[in-house]
């Protein structure tokens, strides 16, 4: 799996940690080993521009996902086909505010947003209550399993 990380902010980002998380989630979702993903960290001005342009909503948001090949999760016996999963854009300053409100670190919030973004790229949504339950349960399980394996506590 190929994960490209670009940080266009002044926030320090441990690129390897985000690469390891993305690879973990993509592997857990049984994506093809040649699947590609891009993570981009941007400031509030850039995120506001993207949020207005693509979602027609004002102000910055925490994360946006832009699917490419509309890949879907595979299974152990039938992995997903090879392709470009898409792009995830994260705004660290918005994530830091949300983290403070939620009582955890900004890094943990950005890891959560990365997991959330990957699930969106795989077709998960949270518009309806049942969709929300399924997506958020999976998101939580994936992130907690990753963090436990990395020796972090949440």
Image (cartoon, rainbow, N blue to C red):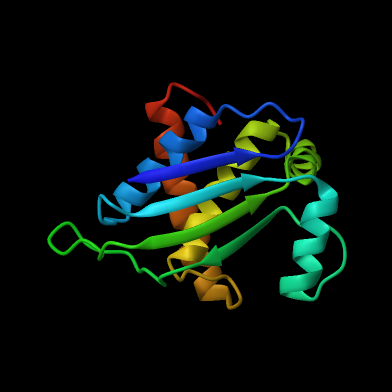
Task: Tell me which residue sits at (82%, 72%) in the image.
Answer: 57
Q: Vertical placement of 8 versus 16: above or below?
A: below
Task: Tell me which residue sits at (40%, 61%) in the image.
Answer: 84
Task: Tell me which residue sits at (79%, 46%) in the image.
Answer: 94
Would residue 34 appear left or right of 43 to someone viewing this image? left
Residue 13, given in percent of the width and then of the height, sits at: 63, 29
Residue 123, given in percent of the width and then of the height, sits at: 45, 71
Question: Quick one: quadrant of the C terminus?
Answer: top right
Residue 36, given in percent of the width and then of the height, sits at: 39, 53
Would residue 121 appear left or right of 14 to someone viewing this image? left
Q: Quadrant of residue 127?
A: bottom right
Residue 129, given in percent of the width and then of the height, sits at: 57, 74
Q: Vertical placement of 27 versus 70: above or below?
A: above
Which residue reaches farthest left?
77
Q: Vertical placement of 88 versus 94: above or below?
A: below
Q: Quadrant of residue 64?
A: bottom right
Task: Tell me which residue sits at (87%, 68%) in the image.
Answer: 58
- How many numbered marks have been drawn onto this rendered protein structure? 0
Task: Name the foreground residue: 72 vs 135.
Answer: 72
């Amino acid at each position: 799996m190929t994960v490209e990380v670009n940080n266009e902010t002044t926030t320090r980002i441990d690129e390897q940690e985000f690469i390891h998380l993305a690879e973990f989630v993509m592997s857990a979702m049984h994506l093809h080993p040649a699947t590609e993903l891009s993570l981009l960290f941007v400031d509030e001005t850039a995120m506001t521009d993207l949020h207005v342009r693509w979602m027609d909503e004002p102000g910055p948001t925490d994360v946006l996902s832009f699917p490419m090949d509309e890949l879907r999760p595979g299974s152990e016996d039938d992995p997903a086909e090879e392709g470009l999963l898409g792009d995830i854009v994260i705004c660290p300053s918005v994530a830091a505010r949300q983290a403070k409100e939620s009582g955890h670190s900004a890094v943990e919030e950005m890891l959560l947003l990365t997991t959330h973004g990957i699930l969106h790229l795989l077709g998960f949504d949270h518009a309806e209550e049942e969709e929300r339950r399924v997506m958020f349960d999976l998101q939580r399980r994936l992130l907690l399993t990753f963090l436990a394996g990395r020796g972090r506590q949440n």
